Amino acid sequence: MPTRVCCCCSALRPRYKRLVDNIFPEDPKDGLVKADMEKLTFYAVSAPEKLDRIGSYLAERLSRDVVRHRSGYVLIAMEALDQLLMACHSQSIKPFVESFLHMVAKLLESGEPKLQVLGTNSFVKFANIEEDTPSYHRRYDFFVSRFSAMCHSCHSDPEIRTDIRIAGIRGIQGVVRKTVNDELRATIWEPQHMDKIVPSLLFNMQKTEEVDSRLGPPPSPSTVDKEENPSVLAENCFRELLGRATFGNMNNAVRPVFAHLDHHKLWEPNEFAVHCFKVIMYSIQAQYSHHVIQEILGHLDACKKDPPRVRAGIIQVLLEAVAIAAKGSIGPTVLEVFNTLLKHLRLSVEFEAGDLQGSSTGSTALTTCSKDSDEKIVQNAIIQTIGFFGSNLPDYQRSEIMMFIMGKVPVFGTSTHTLDVSQLGDLGTRRIQIMLLRSLLMVTCGYKAKTIVTALPTSFLDPLLSSSLMEDYELRQLVLEVLHNLMDRHDNRAKLRGIRIIPDVADLKIKREKICRQDTSFMKKNGQQLYRHIYLGCKEEDNVQKNYELLYTSLALMTIELANEEVVIDLIRLAIALQDSVIINEDNLPMFHRCGTMALVAAYLNFLSQMIAVPAFCQHVSKVIEIRTMEAPYFLPEHIFRDKCTLPKSLEKHDKSLYFLSNKIAESLGGSGYSVERLSVPYVPQAKDEDRLSRRKSIVDTVSIQVDILPSSNHSDDVVSNTEEITFEALKKAIDTSGMEEQEKEKRRLVIEKFQKAPFEELAARCESRAHLLHDRLAQILELTVRNFLKPPVNIY
């Protein structure tokens, strides 16, 4: 019961004390005396200067009742405080607030859960009041600490524990709402407060069901869930906190998330970590997304020596953050993201290579196998992140990223790449090459340039094609796939999948446009380079079926996207050269590879003939394919690339009807208006330094120009006299075309054999002598021209 005083003493007491005493009944079960409460409220509104004293007296009574465990009177006092607070929200209420907060603190410090919840509810009501002017001297450090502690309640009774945790979360939400809107009072964003608030919210969020935000942002909690479920209420509070974060305090709100995930080992498995950052990315303002990405990258750098699955978990979180940020503003972190990811890709390969080299015993080998698998998880996560990030960038930024990644690809014997592979060894270098090219493949997916020059500038094409000559079939496959992504501007590649003889190309409904001037200029400048790499790619001894399929697709896409009449002739020369190289077989290729190249040529010429629609050309190709079907099915892709295909022992006894003949093709195209003079000139690729740098053998390692050298060993035979006597027999021989094909083939074989087997000194001497002869002739012509110019005119009169 409240203490009663005598009537004389009561009359001498201040009026505000008498009004306060009157609101307390003799029995606390009767509750607040409403009539006396109305009088007290009217007095407080009429004399706001008395609010400070009313609050102090109420606080004194409440403290005494808390100590004496008079919970009934405590409830009445807090109810009276709440009503006064709601009725007197004016500037004069500030002194009263201090008393109010002191009473709330007393309740929170008590050990009774009921009083803690009561104090929290009163604080939440206070937090919803908008004050006219902020109070800059007021601090909420105690409330932050106390509410955070309540969020981690471990009470033995589950229901009471849930109530206390909910009260703590609502208290934090009240502190945030009360302080976060005051720009001059930013103490809530200080690290010492965020380090308590954020982990407390995450601790209660951990039971939240996993939400896949790829289909959209996580759903907003319902009103019922907010009040009853601590995890949902904590997530809602966390969203509200992040939504109020500004440029200057964003990092302080995000960094405690990493500390919490590290401390509780939540990166593996990382479902909760992914959910947290989905909440973060959808809650913050879009222009601050790059801050979060920078923080994730920084944490990835800090954890570079952690177990592979931890790093993979962080990278997966980065992927989810990038997926959301790509829809808005990523900011200036584009190159930083790729640079950091490529650095960690190199580190992962380095760790993998070190583990493989260090394994010796059986138990160690088992552990190494597990680490190797874990590192592959890291590498795949990095590649997936790079690809997804790159595919969401605008075209101009994607071109820069393509150049950036290509500059990292190491090529043996060069120092142009910017990635340090000195510690990796050959196996590690090969692994990093594959990883980088896979990353590049992901970035180029969906890239559509208006002109091929934009997609394949020289600064990008040269290093890419250099990589296509490396001694690894998987690397060459990746390079070709990158080329397909960039060349296929009309989505025809899916229609060309698989190497086969297409009966009717029209059924594929190929999409194409007229070749523009920029594309024509590109082929004049870079066409020979593309032909050369396809030619050399067909002659690799480790080619598998997929290599031939990709080479076929490359030729088909060049025909669709870049072929005018001149390019068509060059492509036919290339196909015939591939066929002749298989027949001569100077590289001693296995029979499967020789037949595979034959099948490639057949499939491509069948496609080309139908694309240019020249009837005579189509007829010749169809006839050769028909004869092959009956007599040499191993020259066709449908047979050579199936299991258990029977291979011939040699190709020397095959009839010429099984081959595509250049003179027949020239006749068929010449009748349709094509300029076929160059078809009589055999295609020979030019050798470059990249053959040496990429550790491969070329058929023309010792020559860089095409010259005609006769098989005779005498130097005088190399020079053909320009004053040869013209007789009837000579004219008859020139008109007669019988046997010309065999002569051409023999001449081509002798030229190639001369350049392959002749000593280098002899070749150099021959070229030097021809150069001297040409120099002498030019000097004679110049001298005669000068004499005729300086000769005085003849006087005819």
Image (cartoon, rainbow, N blue to C red):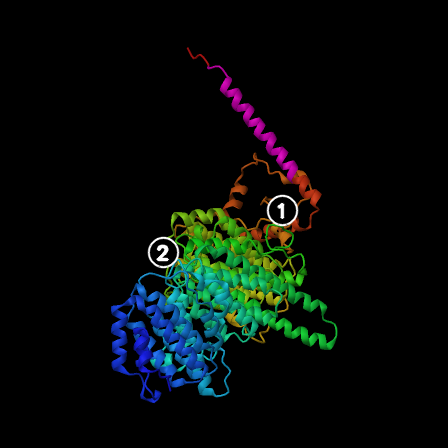
Look at mark 2 in the image and give the residue it sits on. 513
Q: Quadrant of residue 215?
A: bottom left
Image coordinates of residue 200 in percent, x first then y, are 48, 74
Q: At label 2, which amino acid type do we have?
A: Glu
Dot 1 falls on a residue whose secondary structure is loop
| Placement of 780 over or under 491, stated as above or below | above
Mark 1 Cα-neighbour bin, 10 Å: few <14, some 14–19, many ≥20: some
Q: At label 1, which amino acid type do we have?
A: Val
Which residue is nearer to you in this view: 489 or 767? 489
Image coordinates of residue 297 in percent, x first then y, are 53, 62
Q: Are marks 2 and 1 in contact (CB under 8 Å)?
A: no
State the residue at coordinates (47%, 74%). 146
Residue at the right extreme, as displayed? 361
Is residue 602 visible from the viewing direction of this image? no
- Specify the principal SS of the magenta part: helix
Marks 2/1: CA–CA distance? 38 Å
Residue 77 falls inside the magenta stretch:
no
Which residue is nearer to you in this view: 269 or 741? 269
Is residue 87 visible from the viewing direction of this image? yes
Image quarter in which the C terminus is found: top left
Residue 169 bears which disc, if any? none
Residue at the top extreme, as displayed? 797
Q: Earlier in the sequence, mark 2 or mark 1?
A: 2
Look at mark 1 in the image and give the residue it sits on. 703
Question: Which region of the structure is painted magenta?
Answer: 767-793
